[in-house]
Image (cartoon, grey):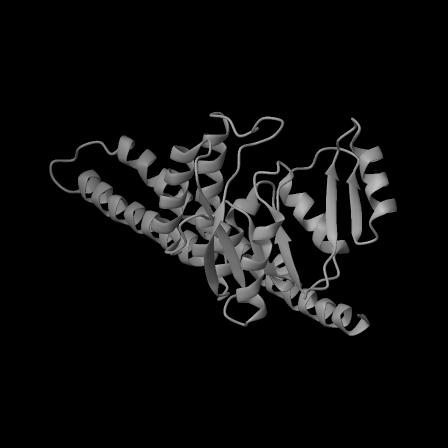
Amino acid sequence: MYAVELVIVNDGSHDGTPKLLEDLTAKHPFVRVVTHRAQRGIADALKSGADVARGRVLVYYPADLQYLPSDIPALVDPILAGQADVVTGTKQGGYNKRFVSGVYNALCRWLFGVRVKDLNSVKAYRREIMDSVPMRPDWHRFMVVIAASQGYRLAERPVPVHPRRAGASKFGIGRIPVGVLDLMSVWFQLRFGRKPMLFFGVLGATLFSLGSLVGLVAIYLRFGPPHVGFRPLLDLIMVLVISGVVLFGFGFVGEMLAGMREELRVLQRELDRLREGRR
């Protein structure tokens, strides 16, 4: 038996949704509603829902009714049994965008080394994961890979996908470039986010060293035989050296930001402890 609640996030809908949700909360005491005044996306909806949820295990289910509530126990059980921290559903059956989804999942497995077949599906996860994963716009798709990078255990369970009863998917071909850029951004954050100097410093040192070497060549060409001009090399030297110094500066700024982020994480953990103590 589970003690459950249903948190519904109205992400800026102004049709008959508010009245319907009001009727549901009056009829079912386990239903709670969060309303956004404007559409803010799935990532913000997940964050808003987690803020008011009282459970220790959260389950993300979209409102398009392609997944049945009867599949929730299969996602939750591994977490309650202490076998996993995040359980993602592997879609079974026919669904739209299968090819795009397959390419995305393959890229994630290759870049992040996450051995999960379907990263962008329904999922269950411990509450603390929501607090440790940065929920920037559209980054809900990378919740699993970010959680895995922080040491959380992953599992997957098959989940049937049913035909959509109403509406249409808002994921079109135009979202693919945005998704690729987000994928690169997440990869960079996970690879160099805690040690930005590792990226900017090495690249800056490389350019600075190249500039110095070209400078030595320019000096030789200017004062040694056969006394050729070195004006084009001077421009190249300036570009390489200045770029190297600027990248070093980015590295120092990145290190300061990384330190501030670690301090914020410590504060977040303290707030979590206080919040748990009040429950």
Q: Give the camera-side residue of 184 and 156.
A: 156
| Residue plotted at (53% across, 30% down) | 171
Q: In the displayed structure, would residue 260 be above or below residue 270?
A: above
Q: Quadrant of residue 273?
A: bottom right
Residue 133 visible: no
- Percent position (x, y) of residue 121? 51, 46
Q: Give the camera-side residue of 246 and 229.
A: 246
Instruction: Give left or right: position of 30 versus 165.
Output: right
Instruction: Give left or right: position of 41 versus 85.
Output: right
Q: Give the camera-side residue of 179 and 82.
A: 82
| Residue plotted at (66% across, 48% down) | 46
Q: Residue furthest left?
A: 226
Q: Quadrant of residue 125?
A: bottom right
| Residue plotted at (25% across, 48% down) | 213
| Residue plotted at (38% across, 56% down) | 115
- Percent position (x, y) of residue 67? 57, 43
- Percent position (x, y) of residue 2? 69, 64
Residue 141 visible: yes
Quadrant containing the N terminus is bottom right
Q: How many marks?
A: 0
- Percent position (x, y) of residue 8? 73, 45
Q: Give the camera-side residue of 137 and 35.
A: 35
Q: Residue furthest bottom?
A: 277
Instruction: Give left or right: position of 85 versus 100.
Output: right
Quadrant containing the C terminus is bottom right
